[in-house]
Amino acid sequence: MKLARAQMNNLETPKTKKDLAKHLGISRSSLYYQPKRNLIDLKLKALIKKVMSDHPSYGHRRIALELKMNRKKILRVMKKFDLKPYRRRTKKPVKPEDIGKAPAIYQNLIKDIIPARPNLIWAGDFTYIKFQGRYIYLATIIDLFTREIVGWAISKTHDRFLCLEAFEMALLKTKSKPKYHHSDQGSEYDSIDYINKLNERKIIISMSKKASPWENGFQESFYSQFKLDLGHTNRFEALGELIEAIYQTIYEYNTTRIHTSLKMSPIQFKIQFNQQIINKNINLIYADNRV
């Protein structure tokens, strides 16, 4: 009887942490342990969501660069909490003037060139931005080395004048000209006025093959990311507000937005490159003086 009662007592639930620890054969402090991984991941989740809010086009690589963390860690937490960058897919309006248009005489001359300095290759293109049931058009010029948007223009119509305005801005802004100008075979870039402008400045003309947008991939990539950063245009009441937002988005792209391949913004990359050239020249001068 006494033995049975002792066994029953051993089955009773311990009443204190000390008793429970003794019953389980562990230290009392281990009963207070909570896994830290979930708390750390929740804090990182909040940081990731903040970056995604500020930069909607950022994937895990640029989020990692922004937070100065390991990209595998960022990717793991994004997968854990199902955090995905927003991707918007829109259809381009058809350009009747380009339907049945004969291929241009110009070839893609830059496909095997890797630019090693600014103002070697500029690429031009334009895109459609829907606003209040109609479209406005944004033309841009991008430097393929720095990835900087060096010229842009906005219009209610897409024609050669829109693209020429962006090109003229690039010339004024950089106080330079490219060796190559690349574009698609759209009627705007294949127009007599645009071709003459390039020939006057002795700029080599390069064009993508017809119906080959990937041959102007830098511009295509810029526009897809740009529209994500710009956001929904229906939040603007007036056209002027939208135009201001477009200018601000381009400014932020050039100055603060991290470019995946550069691991910094285009302007920061250009400044770094120019400083390297200055330092190299100083070292050469110093070496010559020593001789």
Image (cartoon, grey):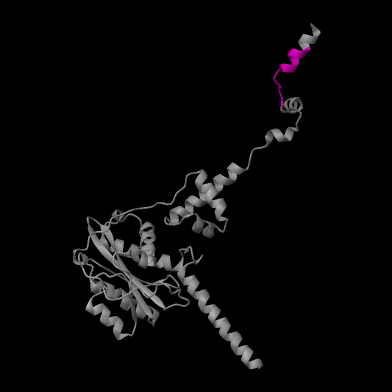
Give the residue furthest to the top. 1
- In percent of width and height, residue 198 lies at 30, 81
Report the residue at 49% width, 67% height from top: 262
Residue 36, above or below 125: above
Residue 39 inside the magenta-drawn segment: no
- In percent of width and height, residue 234 lies at 29, 54
User: 107 or 19, which is in the foreground?
Assistant: 107
- In percent of width and height, residue 251 lies at 40, 67
Report the residue at 30% width, 61% height from top: 242
Report the residue at 28% width, 62% height from top: 128
Quadrant in which the C terminus appears: bottom right
Report the residue at 23% width, 79% height from top: 193
Count of picture labels: 0
- Locate residue 177: give its quadrant: bottom left
User: 90 or 58, which is in the foreground?
Assistant: 90
- Locate residue 100: give its quadrant: bottom left
Segment colored magenta? 6-16
Quadrant in which the N terminus appears: top right
- Relative horizontal placement of residue 286, taking residue 55 as reference (left or right): right
- Relative horizontal placement of residue 221, taking residue 21 as reference (left or right): left
Residue 291, above or below 192: below
- Relative horizontal placement of residue 30, taking residue 44 as reference (left or right): right
User: 290 or 220, which is in the foreground?
Assistant: 220
- In percent of width and height, residue 150 lies at 38, 74
